[in-house]
């Protein structure tokens, strides 16, 4: 039997779930408060330079999930792209993640892998037993010099607090490679959609049983008349901030244009704490198969998210964890709605994980329908 489903949010979560349900014969209404689809993955061509811009910050697709890789490739051609990030620190440019080249350049040495491993071990602070904070973890892994040059300033700017206020769990593994591999990601598949993420998500949404309404903000009365709602907006907003606001970091992007090649790479981080921005993104380098004389760059600043700002990174420290637990309990008492995606579950999710969870959520819904309308859970993944 055909179900009428309301999807709040036309980002990746909404599009992928919506498409699967539409293909199974259900009727989807997708609303988004913004005037464009694709959520935070939105890309748009800059009229002045012709460059494809990642409007809400740089997005590089990378995954080990073969099914997800095939899925995205069925909606757009993925062009080869390897993310190689640089950082400016103390008046020099280095390669990230910290690798053999970074170490040799930083210390003025010509170490081979084994020698570098022993050298870094000799720098590690062995007085620290079980590290409790990000700072202790970093000092235990790499010692003070590398920590201060590459980790400290960036972290202070990104999270707006001192690294000794952040948990050690943020830095789970040694942030150093003892070879010359500067590919930022470990995943098997990596690339960029040839025509940008918005075109790709537009194709996912292009189905006769999907109706998309933009510029429309959800309120709970809209659920009336639908068999089920999937909600990919902020969970605290759904409940009218009943228990307070969940903490996020927001980003400000300061665009500037340049005649030529401004920095020679897509992403340049700034590790020094006295440089107010965290990084500069030069968008044309995300599409190396295109040729553009002119360039558009974004200086990126991070700060606490206010009520009118776009929520980007969930903070998820102990205070926020207690608050999200309250919203999760509240959500479990609400019938007819499933919370999905990065805002609905208050987690940082890469695009491939978002798609994987969306595909699995759609399967859960289809199974519940075929089992005679078994109730859908408020969450298909524990937030
Ligand atoms: C700065 C940054 C960089 C990133 N870089 C990468 C990267 O390089 N690689 C990677 O794999 N992932 C990256 N990500 C993650 C990626 O952005 C997410 O995986 C993806 O956006 C999640 O999709 P979503 O649909 O869950 O959420 P969103 O994209 O946020 O979509 C949610 C949609 O819901 C809409 N909405 C919210 N509330 C309402 C309401 N009340 N009524 C109507 N509509 C509403 C919003 O307008 C939005 O369009 C990055 C994220 C950030 C913040």
Image: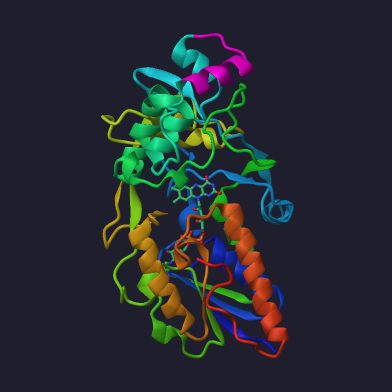
Specify the principal SS of the magenta part: helix
Q: Quadrant of the N terminus?
A: bottom right
Eyeballing the image, is 348 above or below 58? below
> For the point 36% across and 58% down, which residue is it?
318
The picture places residue 358, in percent across and down from the top left corner, at 61, 65
Q: Is residue 80 left or right of residue 322?
A: right
* First to last magenta residue range: 109-122
| For residue 6, side relative to residue 249 (left or right) | right
Which residue is depicted at the point 40% across and 28% down?
Answer: 147
User: Is 330 included in the stretch rendered in magenta?
Assistant: no
Q: Residue 263, percent across and down?
A: 43, 25
Q: Quadrant of residue 100?
A: top right
Q: Residue at x 52, y 77 (%)?
A: 378
Quarter location, residue 48? top left
In front: 206, or 251?
251
Q: Please, which colouring scheme is shown?
A: rainbow
* 115 horizontally vs 299: left or right: right
Query: Is 68 above or below relative to 252?
Result: below
Q: Position of residue 195 (x, y in %)?
A: 59, 47
Q: Tell me if I can see residue 325 in this picture.
A: yes
- For the image, the number of numbered tags is 0
The residue positioned 49% from the left and 19% from the top of the image is 122
Nearest the viewer among 197 and 258 is 197
In the rendered image, residue 189, in percent from the top left (x then y), is placed at 68, 43
User: In this view of the protein, can residue 207 be seen by the observer?
Assistant: no
Q: Is residue 309 above or below residue 365?
A: above
């Amino acid at each position: 039997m055909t179900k009428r489903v309301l999807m709040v949010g036309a980002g990746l979560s909404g599009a992928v779930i919506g498409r699967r349900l539409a293909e199974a014969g259900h009727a989807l209404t997708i609303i988004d408060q913004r005037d464009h689809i694709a959520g935070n993955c939105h890309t748009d061509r800059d009229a002045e330079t012709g460059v494809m811009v990642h409007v809400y910050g740089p997005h590089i697709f990378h995954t080990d999930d073969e099914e997800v890789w095939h899925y995205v490739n069925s909606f757009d051609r993925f062009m080869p792209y390897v993310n190689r990030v640089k950082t400016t620190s103390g008046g020099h440019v280095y390669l990230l993640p910290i690798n053999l080249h970074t170490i040799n350049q930083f210390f003025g040495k010509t170490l081979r892998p084994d020698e570098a491993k022993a050298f870094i071990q000799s720098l590690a602070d062995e007085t620290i037993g079980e590290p409790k904070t990000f700072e202790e973890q970093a000092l235990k892994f790499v010692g003070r010099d590398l920590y201060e040059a590459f980790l400290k300033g960036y972290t202070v700017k990104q999270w707006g607090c001192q690294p000794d206020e952040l948990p050690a769990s943020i830095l789970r593994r040694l942030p150093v490679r003892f070879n010359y591999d500067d590919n930022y990601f470990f995943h098997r598949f990596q690339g960029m959609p040839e025509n940008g993420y918005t075109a790709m998500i537009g194709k996912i949404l292009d189905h006769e049983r999907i109706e998309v309404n933009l510029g429309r903000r959800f309120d709970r009365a809209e659920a009336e008349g639908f068999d089920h709602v999937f909600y990919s907006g902020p969970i605290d907003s759904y409940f009218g901030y009943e228990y307070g606001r969940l903490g996020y970091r927001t980003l400000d992007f300061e665009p500037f244009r340049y005649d030529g090649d401004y920095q020679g790479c897509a992403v340049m981080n700034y590790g020094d704490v006295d440089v107010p921005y965290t990084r500069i993104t030069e968008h044309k380098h995300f599409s190396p198969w295109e040729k553009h004389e002119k360039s558009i760059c974004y200086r990126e600043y991070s700060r606490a998210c206010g009520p009118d700002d776009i929520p980007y990174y969930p903070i998820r420290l102990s205070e926020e964890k207690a608050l999200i637990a309250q919203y999760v309990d509240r959500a479990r008492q609400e019938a007819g709605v499933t919370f999905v995606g990065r805002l609905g579950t208050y987690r940082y999710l890469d695009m491939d994980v978002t798609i994987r969870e969306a595909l699995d959520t759609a399967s859960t819904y289809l199974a519940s329908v075929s089992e005679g309308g078994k109730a859908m859970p408020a969450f298909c993944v524990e937030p």
